[in-house]
Amino acid sequence: MPRPTSRKFDVDALIDAVIDREGAYVNHPADRGGATCWGISEAVARAEGYAGAMRDLPRAEAASIYRRIYWRRPAFDQVARRAPAIATELFDTGVNMGTATAIGFLQRALNALNRSARDYPDIAVDRDIGPRTLSALDALLRLRGAGGETVLLRAIEALQGERYIALAERRPGQEAFLYGWLANRIQGAGAP
């Protein structure tokens, strides 16, 4: 996943990169999500009002869905104002694992990095970005600077990698996707 290099954030480029990577229509037999187009599952497309054939989902409709439910609804736009690399990772993880899971990784990592609540209070791992999560992120960034964003990113990616491996261990059919997940979804070596 490309990392933003400045504080000016281009969510359209982020969405386009995800759509390009996900590709058009796919219905892999081992994918428990079923048919997808541009990375949008049929269940999500239907919930968002799309009634046509999945293979015909317009790219623009997919982009609109990404913006609504994978960017704005989970408040990743608010994270992007503070930490673009973290927002990029949360968005990508949210697309692949669900936004609540991505937010949970952020909250767990923030709690683990607060030096036993000396730097800022622990926050509930409620899988929802609210004022306390944003306050904790602000405090980490204020205390640790750009290095704090990099370390937080690595912590989130470590949690993500562990989840991928555990998933493949629990459901051997998911091993078909493990290499790609680790190669394409975790960018620790390319941190900002």
Image: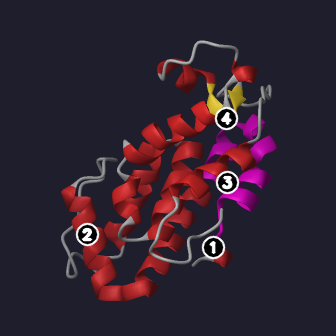
Q: Secondary structure at mark 2?
A: helix
State the image coordinates of residue 99 (x, y, percent, origin top left): 45, 45
Residue 17 marker: 3
- Image mark count: 4
What crowding class fits label 3: few (fewer than 14 Cα within 10 Å), some (14-19), or many (20 or more)? some
Where is mark 1, residue-wise?
A: 188
Q: Which of the 4 image quarters holds residue 69?
A: top left
Position of 37 relative to 81 (above/below): above
Instruction: Report the quarter where the N terminus lies.
Output: bottom right
Q: Which of the 4 image quarters holds residue 138?
A: bottom left
State the image coordinates of residue 73 (x, y, percent, origin top left): 37, 42
- Distance from disc 4 to disc 3, alpha carbons, whole Å, reads 12 Å
- Distance from disc 3 to disc 1, alpha carbons, whole Å, reads 18 Å
Tell me, yes or no, whether the two marked residues, 4 and 1, touch with CB atoms within 8 Å.
no
Where is mark 2, residue-wise?
A: 136
In front: mark 4 or mark 3?
A: 4
Q: Main secondary structure of the magenta part?
A: helix
**Which stretch appears magenta?**
162-188
Q: Secondary structure at mark 4?
A: helix
- Distance from disc 2 to disc 3, alpha carbons, whole Å, reads 29 Å
Which residue is at the front of the view, 192 or 10?
Answer: 10
